[in-house]
Amino acid sequence: MDDAQALFAWACDPEVTRYLRFPSHEDIGDSRKVIERWMAEATKPPFFHWAITIRTTKEVVGSIGIDVQSPHDNRGEVGYCLARHVWNQGYATESLQAVLDFGLQVAGFHRIEACHSVLNPASGKVMQKAGMRFEAGPLHHYYRSDALGYQDTLMYTVFSDTF
Ligand SMILES: CC(C)(COP(=O)(O)OP(=O)(O)OC[C@H]1O[C@@H](n2cnc3c(N)ncnc32)[C@H](O)[C@@H]1OP(=O)(O)O)[C@@H](O)C(=O)NCCC(=O)NCCS
């Protein structure tokens, strides 16, 4: 809960949430509710969600997590988000590589997917640099909002036996 202010700092930024499934947070109460949900989910594993911090300063600048899509098939979907002032410094790539490594080598996922809006090519670049392969698209893989509807998305994947 100590990270609520840090979460709010990026989650209230419309540039950050532009292509995401959730609307910008309107006040810190929205951020606290999200953290409360994560804390509740963390008591019932499997739960894979992390804060991204700057190693030297410990500043919390983002989040990354894997949602289990199908426990039987060991399939998950990874998503990530960083505050705008740290973009283009390699942090998303470094975080995604670490999380894929953990997901496939330690947590037991066989397949991990990631999707990005066609309007958000930086995220596709991150997926490629972290070792994911283009699989399909454009797809209407996720719903943005009533105003914006379904997003045209590109899907990338990695598998435990070829990572
Ligand atoms: C997308 C996002 C995660 C990237 O994070 P980041 O820490 O800046 O990513 P990295 O620095 O590791 O890599 C970014 C790459 O995209 C490239 N890039 C940046 N803007 C770009 C653009 N408009 N078009 C194409 N590539 C772009 C960068 O040059 C860099 O590639 P390079 O290292 O080969 O030069 C970050 O912008 C973000 O959090 N955005 C908002 C939330 C979001 O979109 N999350 C992903 C949802 S699918």
Image (cartoon, grey):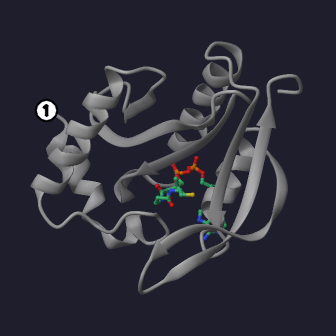
Q: Where does the N terminus fall, quadrant-wise? A: top left
Residue at 58% from the left image edge and 42% from the top image edge:
78
Residue at 53% from the left image edge and 70% from the top image edge:
143
- Percent from the top left, x then y, of residue 87? 46, 54
Mark 1 crowdedness (10 Å alpha carbons): few <14, some 14-19, many ≥20: few
Q: Where is ligand 1, by quadrant?
A: bottom right
Could you tell whether 87 is left or right of 61 in the image?
A: right
Say what secondary structure mark 1 lies in: loop
- Percent from the top left, x then y, of residue 75? 69, 34
> In the current view of this chain or complex, which residue is farthest to the top?
106
> In the current view of this chain or complex, which residue is farthest to the bottom?
147
> How many tags in the picture?
1
Depth check: give the residue in front, 123 or 67: 67
Q: Is 15 rendered above or below residue 62?
A: below
- Percent from the top left, x then y, of residue 19? 49, 69
Q: Quadrant of residue 58?
A: top left
Q: Where does the C terminus fall, quadrant-wise? A: top right
Q: Is 97 rendered above or below residue 13?
A: above
Could you tell whether 87 is left or right of 42 in the image?
A: right
Q: Is 123 rendered above or below residue 121?
A: above
Depth check: give the residue in front, 51 or 71: 71
> In the current view of this chain or complex, which residue is farthest to the right?
162
Residue at 49% from the left image edge and 47% from the top image edge:
80
Type of the residue with mark 1: Asp
- Percent from the top left, x then y, of residue 65? 49, 37
Depth check: give the residue in front, 100 or 95: 100
> In the current view of this chain or complex, which residue is farthest to the front?
72
**Residue with the mark numbered 1:** 2
